[in-house]
Image (cartoon, helix red, strand yellow):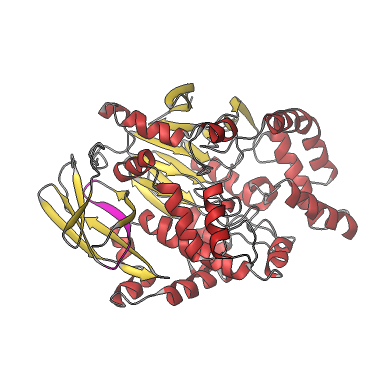
Amino acid sequence: MPALVVGPMLRHVDTDSASIWVETAEPCTVTVEAGGRAYRSPTFTVHGHHYAIVDLVELSQDIASYSVSLEGEEVWPLAGRPPSGIRLLPAAGARRLAFGSCRSSVPHDAAHVRTYGEDVLRSYGRHLANAGDAEWPDLLLLLGDQVYADNPSPDMLAYIRSRRSTPPHDEIADFEEYAELYRQAWTEPDIRWLLSTVPTAMIFDDHDLRDDWNTSQPWRERMAGTSWWRRRVVAGLGAYWVYQHLGNLSPAERAADPLLRTLLDRGGRDGGDALDAFAEKADAEPSSNRWSYARDLGPARLIMVDTRCARQLTPGDRRMLDPAEWAWLEEQVSAPAERVIIGSSIPFLLPEGVHGVQNWNEALCDGKWGPLVRRWSEAFRQAIDLEHWAAFRRSFEDLAGLLIRLGKPVLILSGDVHYSYLAKADTGPVYQVVCSPIRNPLSRMLRWANVFTQFSIATLVGGLLARLAGIPRPPFRWRITKGPWFQNALATLTLPDQVTWYDSGGDVLRPIESVRLE
């Protein structure tokens, strides 16, 4: 009989529907029984792996428990685990969001806990298993680096070495390895149960593909010169579409997806070629596909922005978002809502001094001080990750102006930098809320280095360097009002305006700080 490989994962949920994603060991029909009704979907196949996403529609109330069957054989829930339920989005809107980024899927033994700390997502799952309804989030936002394709765990490295000795050594090479990477990331029992019963929305960052992905045009040219990058990026984007992106979409959006229709129409025949062609085009022509998406959460509007694949890397006219993506973002931000929540894997508001350093470096990379300095500056850009919104200054200024004109509260949720903090603009209610990492902390030496450079030296010299390069001042100023905290963390946003960061001790969730946005 077919077996469940990954999942079930509760993905898109609104006021009257829910979507459940699974990976199975064989082609089959997947049945979800919930609220006295049965919902079915056939699997589709890519590269020898089998997936389905089952839409539960016309729901009128929360589901206390659901089950999953494959060809009539029940495979979920697991014995001894709490039931997996479905909490619909309240008619009045979302009450609480949980969010974080950067989770390395290493084992949970004592040796790895000493190096990587405790997995706060795992602790959160254990906490919710015994928590009252008031503590449950309506949505869990995973803001990038859900997997580390360029720095796999020991178990993943053993899997890679068991099947090949070709480049890229000690990194993911193809779809088969990505499938195993996701399986290892999402099947630890407490994580698996959490993902089966809390709706999730996701967006990639660089490590889902590779460190510094799309930092600059020279970076792309260097990677294109390797023997293995084309296969890697095609596999990475294809796997992202299957494992992360499909579940971000509503049932209606998914029904209109031409690639999914192609795969389902093949009737179980392998569609790896169609997936690869889609992924290769998405990398070569970013405007051919949109990874960004938006959802109405009642009075709040959530906009998850692709800040990696949609970049325009033209020297002298770098943009975080290409023209088509920028036009889409303008439209989404302008839609009716009391407040806007933007999910950006990389922070929009960095410490001000670091912002100035990145402005300065971009100008030098564009030749401000000549070709020799340009080459040195490009190496510097890649070496210390100068690739945030500040390093795409034109896009930063465009978005800053847009948010100022908006005249309503804007909360930008981000990760990436491996520390957590809150920043506030001095013009209007614009907040940057960062929570990173879920499980991948900086070493103690790197923590002190970050404090010293980003909150000390950079504060003094960043603005000066930007002025020396002729960079105009940003449209507004901002300051860090809470943090930084460097431990593993997960955060919650209790709407409309309370943010709480948590860490974990002895697998018990502990608050770090709670603040009301004013």
Give the left or right position of residue 214, taking residue 379 as reference.
left
At 50% from the left and 61% from the top, the residue drawn is 177
Q: Position of residue 417 (x, y in %)?
A: 61, 39
At 78% from the left and 37% from the top, the residue drawn is 462
Q: Position of residue 206 (x, y in %)?
A: 59, 52
Q: Position of residue 499 (x, y in %)?
A: 45, 28
At 57% from the left and 50% from the top, the residue drawn is 152
Query: Which residue is most to the front?
Result: 162
Give the left or right position of residue 263, taking residue 68 as reference.
right
Placement of 305 over or under 484, stated as above or below:
below
Tally the numbered discs.
Answer: 0
Q: Nearer the viewer, residue 135 or 479?
A: 135
Q: Which residues are magenta?
A: 15-27
Is-magenta flag for residue 59?
no
Q: Position of residue 481 (x, y in %)?
A: 59, 24
Q: Is residue 331 visible?
A: no
Image quadrant assignment for residue 457: top right
Q: Is residue 288 visible?
A: yes
Q: Nearer the viewer, residue 469 or 222?
A: 222
> Which image quarter holds the N terminus?
bottom left
Is-magenta flag for residue 19?
yes
